[in-house]
Image: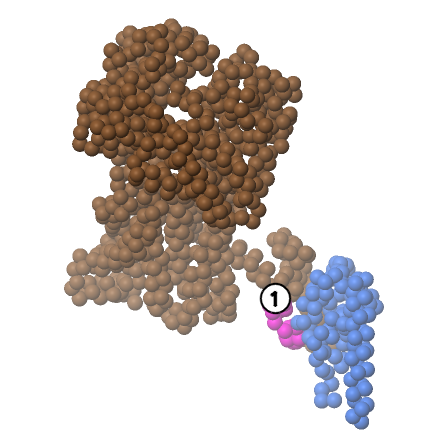
Chain colours: A brown, B blue
Amino acid sequence: MAQLLNLLPWRRRRLERELDRELRYHMERRVEDLRQAGATDTDARRQAALEFGGLAQVREDVRETWVWRRLDNAGRDVRYAFRMLRRSPGFAITALLSLTLGTGVNAAIFSLVDQVLLRPLPVSDPDRLVHLVWRGNSLASHWGSGYLMSYPLCRDLQEQREFFDGIFCRHVTTVNVSTGQQREPVRAEIVSGSYFPVLGVRPALGRLLDASDDLQPGAHPVIVLSYRYWMNRLGGSPEVIGRKVLVNNYPMTVVGVAPAGFPGVDPLAPPMLWVPAAMTEQAANIDAYWDRLLDRRAAWLNVLGRLKPGLSTEQAKAGLQPWFTSMLVADARREGFPRVTAEQRTSFLASTVDILPAPGGLSNLRGALERPLWILTGGTLLLLLLASLNVAGLMLARGAARSRELTTRMAIGATRTRIASQVLVESLLVTVAGGALGLVAAPAAARVLLAYLSWDRDIRVHIDGGVFAFAFLTSVAIGALCAIAPALQTGRLPLIAALKERSPLAGDGLRLRKALMIGQLAFTLILLVGAGLFVQTLAHLYDEAAFPSSRLLMLSVNPPGSGYSPPNADRAMREMYQRLQEVPVVERVAAANARILSGGAASTTLTIQSDKRFVTDGAVARMRVGPGFFATLGTPVIAGREFDEADVRPPGAASTGERTAIVNESFARRYFKDRSPVGYRIGLGNRPDAVTNIEIVGVVKDIGFRDLRDAEREKVYFHYWDRDSSGGTFYVKLRGSGDSAFAAIRAAVAQVDPALPVTLTMFDEQIERSLWTERMVAALSTGFAVIALLLSAIGLYGVMSFVVTQRTQEIGVRLALGATRRAAVWLVVRDALVMVGAAAAIALPSAWVLKRLVEAELFGVRAFDGPTLVLAMAVLAVVTLGGVMVPAWRAASLNPTDALRLE
Amino acid sequence: MASARFPIPQGTLDMLILQTLSLGPAHGYAIAQRIQQVSREAVQVNQGSLYPALHRLEQKRWLKAAWRPSETGREAKFYAITRAGERQLAAEKETWDRLAAAVQLIFDEGS
């Protein structure tokens, strides 16, 4: 311990001072004694010195007792490295900046990856949680997102105890909750009775739901509150148990509170309350199509389960499949099974059950972010590698520049190990400092990322232990990576040769530096190609959004949420529709039941009656829109007409269900081939008794609906006013643009009910929001590519300057012998271009490998896109030339006489 | 005996220092003098190795040091043996005795 303390500089200085005094005392006493014995002053001094031996050696030996030699050397190396770095700030700053950028961006992305993708659910033994997925055609209508199954199937699955310790189902929805005075829409999870028992959650208060709450449809009016909702809205009062609250105007009793921090199965969108599935019809905000809790053709639940201990997903999958197949066979024999073609039946019966690990639960946001985040992680890793290659290159350059110094030191006795360790310490110092700075910069970088994730979700910047460890380990790994090459290089210095005037070391060192440079250029090229693809994807998607969006806005209202009965809600909607049309700044207005491009879409199976009767292969995306909807959005009608006012059901008249429909081009192409579907009839659902009384009145051009990518999916539009409106969205096209109209529009709605909450969104904003991941990926990949280009240009400048210095003499000779200046420039440029060529030869096959990772994220462009590759190479070549410009110019402007005199 | 003075065997210097200091504190020069006098000039202490040994023993806490005025009146660094040093000295003496006895036995056998 004392030896460690002796490393402290002030302590060290005292020890040195005292040693000096001690040795001086000894010498003086000896000289005195010898003089008293009769020696002359000079002789005495000589004799004393001889007896003592080398004073410097003694000092060194004493010092060694103070601290362990290795430790001392390390301390000295650090101090030395600091001095050397201070002496070349350009190198230090470039290296530090490269690494700060590299680790900072990496830590930021990793903190997101960790939070969104890797964190397990806070329940017992999350590793055994799995997600059950139906692969194949389920012939079902869909409601919700992700992989969906029907409630009866979920109940069947709960009986399968051979492979599972339990299976449960859930559906996320928004309900209007009234706890007294205030009423608000909150996120709710509709769950099977097995939900809490299988997850193994204990209540914070009261009890949680169990199997006894999910027996008879409509017979269990109970709910469980989330801890957060209980604290924030009900003041954490224990008297809440047994209290009645209105859920979508249906009275339900609170029986318990879930524990703090339990987020349901979606940690990124925790619900505020849980409702038993048996109460779906009463409590959940179900649209008119959905009154079939027991319908096997209605898929609306995500199914999860807990595997028995020690069982793999593969084993469970193989074990469950025979039962699943027999279930399919039984299902196909059931009365009410759709009349399908032989082909459709075969595809139904060939369906399989898949079992996916789900330790982190299920999350829509995670689904949307998974690929982009992995792609960005890949990008940052490339960037980090590139940065470290750059630093390694810089270090090699320093090593070369210092070869004279280093070899001199070796010549006077330093060992190779000592010198190599000095170089190593210097590299480690830079990289660890870079890593530390990167960590400091990481929260800021993560905040920038989150700005792109402007989404009302529960993601925050967390730089926790895991992220810290990750960043630290990467920076140390990089340190080692950067340091090894230069350290080895110095370990191999040819001593005598290097001491001579012109060192042949250049050959070896330069080859290594060029190899590093090629690596950097290859990474840059990959990043450039990636950026090119993602930017094009974004551009194509913007093209897809061919709406008059700067003059378009969406206004959403939900009268039932404010306590309107269905007939009253319908009346209010009609009145608002009238008022909006009378506002002077409004050019056009149309009603619809949903906001497009908001990530969700319902879908339904259909029965089609053309010359024969048949059912659709799968579910068709559906939406209800009012007259003028397509005109408002600027979507062309290809055949027939769009809904008009004459189709509108008179106010107060009882609904007789859907009467007219419009389909999109893709639907017409798939089910009517080259005929026009106009005039034919369809029916909802695919049961044999489905009534086909809905007339197709028109065909419209494909538009994106859930998002801008799904334009080509088959879609059907029904008439908005055919059913009692329960709220919805008005699409308003303005005469002028933007903000001034907001007040007038709000005022028009307020005339109907000033207390009704209204959500106003400009369509521009909606498009931006629907493209947020694409924008993030495009922006970040472009940023990465620019940084990569910059680093490469710097690196290349360094290498080529070195080359020119090394070849000054050669170039001088050539010029003296009559070579043109252009030839001299070419000498340098050719070198650089060869490196770019080599980089391309490495990068292009890698881009081919990466194809699979990025393909699903692309739109309107293929992963191995010729023009993009050519453009990326062109950009790289141009920047490369920029990087070699100065060295090349220096080569060309060499004065042959000076160059030769250098020798 | 080939030479009047022989260099001390490796590792014995520590023992000699400890032994010398067990009689009382002394500074480096005095220690060197005393070892030479007591061994009747037979042992030559290499003064170059004395100081590293002193510092090593100090780092091991077998010696402690203090600056005091010496017999000439000037300040010198006086070393004194510690408890741990005394224990070490006893242990080394015992080892030495055993070694010497063993060597003696071997010599007796041969004669």
Mark 1, residue position: A60
The C terminus of chain A is located in which quarter? Answer: bottom left
The 10 Å Cα crowd at callout 1, few under 14, some 14 to 19, many 20 or more, is few
Magenta part of the protein: which range?
Answer: A41-61
Q: Tell whether position A145 is magenta.
A: no
Q: Nearer the viewer, residue A823 or B22?
A: A823
Q: Residue at 73% across / 85% down in the picture? A: B4
Q: Residue furthest top?
A: A751
The N terminus of chain A is located in which quarter? Answer: bottom right
Q: What's the magenta bit mostly, secondary-structure-wise?
A: helix
Establish if A529 lies above or below A251: below
Establish if A854 lies above or below A575: below
Residue A110 lies, in percent from the top left, at 46, 42
Check the residue under mark 1 and report the chain it is in. Answer: A
Q: Tell whether position A56 is magenta.
A: yes
Residue A510 lies, in percent from the top left, at 34, 62
Q: Nearer the viewer, residue A237 or A489?
A: A237
Q: Nearer the viewer, residue A165 or A366?
A: A165
Residue A645 lies, in percent from the top left, at 25, 11
Q: Quadrant of residue A261?
A: top right
Decide if residue A12 is on the left or right side of residue A658: right
Q: Quadrant of residue A332?
A: top left
Q: Residue at 72% across / 78% down in the picture? A: B8
Decide if residue A485 is on the left or right side of residue B42: left
